[in-house]
Amino acid sequence: MEGLTRRSFVAGALTLASAPRSVAYGRSDRLRLGVVGVGGRGAENLRAVAHEEIAALCDVDEERLRAAMRLHPNARTYTDYRRMLDDGGLDAVVVSTPDHTHACVALAALRAGLHVYCEKPLCRTVAEVRAVRDLARQKRLVTQLGTQIHAGSNYRRVVELVRGGAIGEVREVHTWVGGGYEHGSYPSETPPLPPGLHWDLWLGPAAYRPYHPEIAPGRWRRWWAFGNGQLGDFGCHHMDLPHWALELRDCVRVEAEGPPPHPDAAPPWLIVRYDYPARGSQPPVRLTWYHGGRRPPHIAEGVAPDWSAGNLFVGSKGMLIADYGRRQLLPASQYEGYEPPQPTIPESVGHHREWLDAIRSGGTTTCNFDYSGALTETVLLGNVAYRVGQALEWDSRRLRARNCPEADGTIRQPSRPGWEEA
């Protein structure tokens, strides 16, 4: 911990200390958890599981690590997750690192026989996602992706409406969010490394490049080497709802349009069209994703409200628009007096609590890596199609585009020497 100033330590500690703590279950059989990544989303996840025994804390930023230590003084501390796993004594691991290190941490934890909670998207590349999915299934471990909104009541009610036939047969879904990242090359300046930041460990399996604040800590999602832009950030949250309601799994075709691809950076806007096959008695579905100011045509036509983000299900009898907390059947005049179906999907005990309870009971979770892995693979394929500039005929079983062998270089990407087995 050398190199930390007292001022930075105290400031970070007060930030975490001012946040509300989770309420303990009052159980004597607390799980021993290791938390990798304790700032940003990591701090939120740490609070959500703090009623368990926080046995180990790991972060490549010593200032963030010391702030978390203030709340969990009995935890062992590490800057390298590999040392944490080598020391053992854990039941499960929470992974809240940038996307490019999700796979190496999750795979190492699964190999060690530990249950895993991982922030979304599950991994940075499609091949990494498949490796994590397969290992979790092989090891029969309890997993959960950090798509916390899945635990909300509104998503449950939307699923019941769609499956209950409120809008008829659904062949079309539109999913959109705002925002995006500007194109541009990596900065050429090489400012000094902040004290206490272990840059080589932050990079992990990514190719080496000098530190710059435009990369870390906050804007790494902009760069292909570390993230997947706006689609990677929000796709798993919003596309989760149609995947759940319509029982979607692997798409069979994906095409994308946007500005000319940049070799370094994700696009400011994107439109992606995913085609899914029929599922039993349910027909094929096309799901269209939009971000960066693009919207479904139904909004411009005035037949759907202009929400900043959401899903629009288009059925044979009507439409349903929904976001995290709202839902509305359309046209409104057609559904006056409509009685929704009685709730059939039980309320969640909480997204993190689902995972913890399933570890104790030997059960499963709603966003385990099998379900959420298929979702993440589909989301990431939108960026693959965009970057290669060609529609992909997708063969999920073989993990390849039948018509585009050059896509393989984006589906699978090598790790930096020394990190191949990390």
Image (spheres, rainbow, N blue to C red):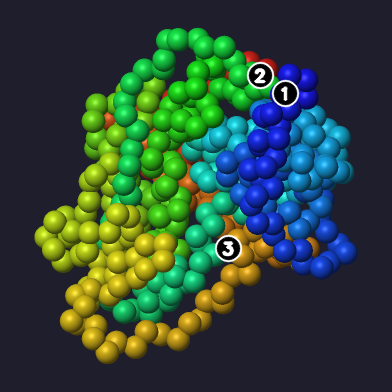
In the picture of the structure, the residue carrying the numbered disc 2 is: 195
Residue contact between numbered discs 1 and 2, judged by CB atoms under 8 Å: yes
> Dot 3 lies on which element?
loop
- Residue reaching furthest to the left: 301
- Dot placed on the residue nearer the N-terminal end, 1 or 2: 1
Q: Residue at x 23, y 30 (%)?
A: 259
Task: Quarter of the image for the N terminus: give it.
Answer: top right
Give residue 379's position: percent from left, percent from top: 41, 45
In the picture of the structure, the residue carrying the numbered disc 3 is: 366
Instruction: Give the amino acid type for the residue marked by disc 3 in the picture.
Output: Thr
Does residue 397 show up?
A: no
Instruction: Give the amino acid type for the residue marked by disc 2 in the picture.
Output: Pro
Q: Nearer the viewer, residue 48 or 136?
A: 48
Q: Residues within 10 Å of mark 3 (few under 14, many from 20)?
A: some
What is the spatial separation of the Cα atoms under label 3 and label 1, in whole angstroms? 41 Å
Q: Residue at x 65, y 22 (%)?
A: 197
Q: Nearer the viewer, mark 3 or mark 2?
A: 2
Q: Quadrant of residue 170?
A: bottom left
- Dot placed on the residue nearer the N-terminal end, 3 or 2: 2
Residue contact between numbered discs 3 and 2, judged by CB atoms under 8 Å: no
Q: Residue at x 83, y 59 (%)?
A: 30
**In this rendering, is residue 316 above or below 127?**
below
Q: Quadrant of residue 49?
A: bottom right
Q: Residue at x 73, y 50 (%)?
A: 115
